[in-house]
Image: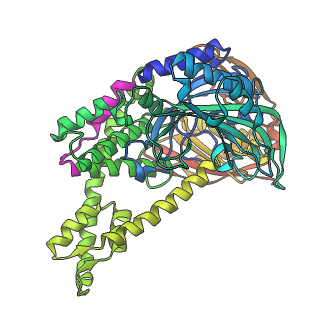
Amino acid sequence: MKAEELRTKYIEFFVSNDHKEISGKSLIPENDPTVLFTTAGMHPLVPYILGEVHPAGKRLTNVQKCIRTGDIDDVGDATHLTFFEMLGNWSLGDYFKKEAINMSYNFLKDVIGIDINKLSVTVFQGDEDAPCDNESIGYWKDLGIPENRIYKLPKKDNWWGPAGQTGPCGPDTEMFVDTGKEKCSDSCIPGCGCGKYFEIWNNVFMQYDKQEDGTFKPLARPCVDTGMGVERTITMLQGKNSVYQTELFTPIIKKLEDLSGKKYGVDDSTDMSIRIICDHIRTSTFIIGDDKGVQPSNIGQGYILRRLLRRAIRHGKKLGLEGNFCSKPSEIIIEMYKNQYPELLERKDLIFSVLETEEEKFGLTLKKGEAEFEKLIPNLKKNPKMIIPGRVAFNLFDTYGFPLELTEELAQEEGMTVDRAGFDAAFEKHKELSKQGADKIFKGGLADDSEMSTKYHTATHLLHKALKIVLGEHVNQKGSNITSERLRFDFSHHDKMSDEEIKAVEDLVNKAIQDNLPVSMETMSVEEAKEKGAMALFSSKYGEQVKVYQMGDFSLEVCGGPHVERTGTLGVFRIKKEQSSAAGVRRIKAVLSDK
């Protein structure tokens, strides 16, 4: 089964089970300060999981494009990817464990033909916070899964959340297919990394609300959140050993073979470089081509994009690729995904332009790295062992993006060697720190729903409209980041705002606040929202229902919520900083105060 067929069958199955298909959202999260990218299908549904009413109802399904950046340095093996597609279905206070497990079982068995005799499942074993998930165990037994293929595991394996210190959380049940490989040890069970058990699906049952005192109370409205990765699942269904052997990567690999004159599957080093380029250019193409796409920079999403591209370019050089080459595999990727994600084709010229510009910039960066190396040599040669310390080589790599291989080449020309063990140690420390940061970010995946965050969310609507009035209709939201202390708002505009323009925007927002405008919500189709002139990036499917929030006669915008009831409760709006975020994108940081 190929990816396109899996996507179609998944959506059709859940639509036939009374779910409404909804659009996947941007890779750039909306109003979520805790993540750089959308990491799972549930992220765009945060307001609804926390209690907002979804315009499409209580049963939802979709395909969501996702990025996870915690394993960038591991990409290149057979399994790790930074960009992937996640199939998901949700119950927002409707069905719960029995129905979710039954539907999962039926889809695996009847739709994609999994041999149920090879299916094992894991469930939460219980602890002092919550009991063993005997309900899920019972439902799996009812479906014929024997007790010896049902594994009870602790929180670290079978529990999701809460996002922060408090909030919705609960046990999950994960499904694994036995690949037929020998067990790596007597203790080998589903979840082991040896490859015997392939995780195919995860059903999360949000049924608790963690309190500030650490206790867990039952949620008033339990929800179901599930996820199935497209790439991983088709790999298993096609009997492949690696995602790179599937149709989602073989055309990209073929293009790189043609460009480099090297063959995939012959040499481990070559294979590693080709896989890194495939993944990183694929991810970069989707980031740049997204509805709220960003460009390379030294902060936030732009930094991740730059890191991906420079790693791909370095490996291109290892393959002997000269000049600008990134747009060649990107063109293959756009062609492959243009029907599923038409925004890539619409932004094709922009994608190519950004890729080529970054390649040229990185060429200059490498020259700086060489110059820095030359400055260091006189002092380094004072060491009678003629060894360049690993930390020095790593600093060249981390600060200048200067590849270790080039440092070793230059060192050899000077009659020196590089302490590779020291470099590896510094690199491992860097990876661990990066992973800790990524884990911290991912665990904080749900934005909080505090009173102040709700006020800031509402204020972004007023700011968006005020910017359009002062600067022009070309202004569109490119991203936002909200905490309970401030808002950050990115928008399309080429020039630095003048003091007069900033003051005019502030005055418009504060006038709307002083007028104490009523905030109302109406559910309507995308087409109706367009006709009414609502502000939005309309990527939703035809006929899909959306929420439109109106603030008096001032603002009309498609949004998921939450919002205050009247603008007069917001306080005084002040812009603290206006700066560049990326090429053609400006960023405002603002606060609300009582006076």
- Of 40 and 264, the residue lying toward us: 264
Which quadrant of the rendered structure holds the C terminus? bottom right
User: Residue at point 32% right, 39% down?
Assistant: 353
- Of 151 and 488, the residue lying toward us: 151
Mark yes or no: residue 446 visible.
no
- Provide residue 365's location: percent of width, then percent of height: 29, 59
- Provide residue 422's location: percent of width, then percent of height: 36, 72
Mark yes or no: residue 438 visible.
yes
Q: Is 328 included in the stretch rendered in magenta?
A: yes
The residue segment tinted magenta is 318-337
User: Residue at point 55% right, 53% down?
Assistant: 438
- Provide residue 59's location: percent of width, then percent of height: 69, 21
Indicate left or right for 154 with 593 as reference: left
Indicate left or right for 84 with 565 as reference: left
- Please identify the quarter of the rendering in which residue 568 is found: top right
Overall secondary structure of the magenta section: helix
